[in-house]
Image: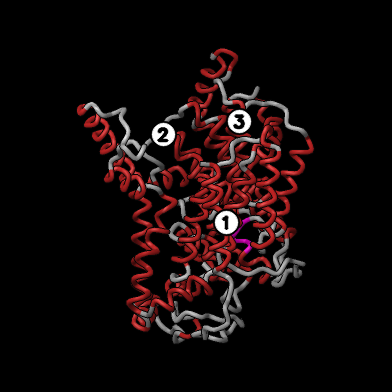
Amino acid sequence: MKFFLSLISLVFLMASASFAVADGHDQPAYPKLADGSTQYAAFPKPLETYPQPNSSIMETLKIRAMADPFNLAASVIFLLAILHTFAASTFTKLSHQIGHRHEEELKRRGVRDELHPTGMQEVSFPATVLHYLGEVEAVFGMWVIALAGAAIYYHSWHDFILYIAKDRIFTEPLFVFVIMAIAASRPVLRASEILMAKAAALGKGSPAAWWLSVLIIAPVLGSLITEPAAMTIAALLLAKRFYRYDPSPALAYGTLGLLFVNISVGGTLTHFAAPPVLMVAEKWGWNSAFMLEHFGWKALVGILLSSGFYFLWFRKELFQISNQVASCEDGVIEEPWHDRETAIPAWVTLVHLGFLGWTIYTAHYPVLFIGGFLFFLAFSNATGHHQSPLSLKSPLLVGFFLAGLVIHGGCQSWWIEPILTTLPNQALMLGSTILTAFNDNAAITYLASQVTNLSLSAKHAVVAGAVTGGGLTLIANAPNPAGQSILSQYFKDGISPPRLLLGALVPTFIVYACFLILPNGAAKEQPPEIPAIKQTIPQH
């Protein structure tokens, strides 16, 4: 199974990387756009090709829908995919019910323990199909099939191929796949655990102390190691130190919502860690000093306030869980060997941290970080006695989820752009926060970066709203699927999007208030340019 998953991952990586290879024979539909880029597919129509809006938002959307009916079809499909994510837990519940009835039927027939001649145990086809429909990470990939049908109907199969192979950039899904796999390795996780154990020791290492330590330190750490890596580490530590003790649904969803919000804003202390900031940092000249002055310190205040509020709100149950764990024999539950605090040679940990750093440094160059990942796999195999079993299932599913979101998100700018450009500055932050709940926040800031003559206050409002709303839904922030993939096993019938939304509302409101009320630094309209690595922006 380990080899099989590795083989699948390599095929996925090579296939995705090949999307960026141009064969030189296809003629672009739009050879020279205003920003100097080229678009090969006939859809979606570039924003600059529409008539300049001089009426209401609804009239503008009507004109654009009439100009290319595919716009409306693509957005309806995207809406259905979002609704599917909200219904995923229902599919999972039905799958469990049908599967249980199937097992009861097998027992009644007396064949429960018998194997099919092929060597496989008899399974229920309807239960399996419903199980796949309930896999949140697979939803957007499934609906790409419907999008392909609409693209072929309104345009052509060739245009769809060009859209996928040449107009979409899959660097972010590939990066998240690699960074998740490395961050989840035992040496990296143990090093992070030791760091957070120092803070948890102030509370005698109880689940409540670990809860507070992880939810505060890991998001801030995300500004250095990127948000996907911080999400992976935080989710794995919460699974080990908190969720395993079976918290109530209210506390479980509150913790998940708080984690998503904190991770989303925790990456704003630097200019390279949060996807929505990365989309605009180079073009707007925002360096890490600028981010820390205008966003980072506010985000830190928001993280402390929201974590402290939830800690006080759930303190009774958190202390109850801590007391139950303390009353257990030896104070812990028996763990598998790879989770126990056995020594790992320092040089092994340093090599793993080196691979993590290399992946972050080369985040915009798939050929480099994928090559590094192959060396990482070889090193992990050579030091297997110090490693946990390497599971690529979660990274693969999350990469698949983000790839589907890149494909769908690229067809939504026709309605997002007029909303962003027509809102006054006072409403722009709120509008950005709401839009983020229905689309990846990096897409929101990317579209804002394409607007000319946007004031500094408007730029600030868009980015603040985008990172603030990053915890409201699974699709609001790129690292969220990583946390969902790791922690979904602790939620009966999977994670419910409406309950996640409720769990994230309070910290979202607190962070929103921090960005809105706390003063900005004295800023120039054009901050100093940053010496950044040239990047290819994933237009989703």
Instruction: Please name the residue that numbered disc 1 is placed on.
Output: 516
Which numbered mark, 1 or 2, is in the foreground of this view?
A: 2
Packing grade of label 1 (10 A; few <14, some 14-19, many >=20) is: some
Instruction: Please name the residue that numbered disc 3 is placed on.
Output: 210
| Residue at 46% from the left image edge and 51% from the top image edge | 474
| Residue type at numbered disc 3 | Trp
Q: Is residue 153 magenta?
A: no
Q: Decide: marks 1, 3 in contact (CB < 8 A)?
A: no
Instruction: Please name the residue that numbered disc 2 is placed on.
Output: 249
| Residue at 48% from the left image edge and 50% from the top image edge | 397
Q: Residue 20 vs residue 417: left or right? A: right
Q: Quadrant of residue 143?
A: bottom left
Question: What secondary structure is marked by label 3?
Answer: helix
Packing grade of label 2 (10 A; few <14, some 14-19, many >=20) is: few
The magenta region covers: 274-278
Question: What secondary structure is marked by label 1?
Answer: helix
Q: Mark 1 or 2 closer to N-term?
A: 2
Q: Decide: marks 1, 2 in contact (CB < 8 A)?
A: no
Q: Position of residue 456 (x, y in %)?
A: 64, 69
Q: Mark 3 or 2 closer to N-term?
A: 3
Q: Decide: marks 3, 2 in contact (CB < 8 A)?
A: no
Q: Mark 1 or 3 closer to N-term?
A: 3
User: Is residue 301 shown to the viewer in this render?
Assistant: no
